Image (spheres, rainbow, N blue to C red):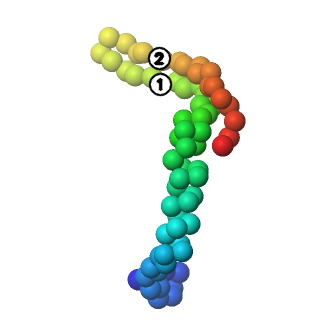
Amino acid sequence: MTAFGADQGDYHLTPADLRQVEELKRGKYETWEWNFGASPSYNIKKSGHFPWGKLDVLLDVAGWGNHWV
């Protein structure tokens, strides 16, 4: 494989690398807080044109648990 003009080989994860990946997965990415713990507030507007006219949908969504994990 060539990247940025140089030949690159494959990198194979070592057992130590795999342990670190598993630890990070369990300690951070599998947690409820990471996956569901925050929902930021946001606004959205969608419009659609139909044979009978135009439809606008405007939403103001209030988040909960607004903290970044």
Pointers 1 and 2 in contact (CB under 8 A)? yes
Q: Residue furthest left?
A: 51
Q: Which residue is mark 2?
A: 56
Q: Quick one: label 1, few (<14), some, or many (20+) residues within 10 Å?
A: few
Identify which residue is drawn at 52% across, 67% down: 19
Q: Nearer the viewer, residue 14 or 62?
A: 14
Task: Check the image and name the residue furthest to the top.
Answer: 52
Residue placed most toward the observer, 27 or 52: 27
Residues packed near mark 2 inside 10 Å, few (<14), some (14 to 19) or many (20 plus): few
Q: Amino acid at mark 1?
A: Lys
Q: Is residue 30 left or right of residue 66?
A: left
Residue at 52%, 24% (x, y): give it. 45
The image quadrant that residue 32 belongs to is: top right
The secondary element bearing badge 1 is classed as strand
First in sequence, mark 1 or 2: give its number.
1
Q: Position of residue 9 (x, y in %)?
A: 44, 86
Q: Which mark is residue 65?
A: none
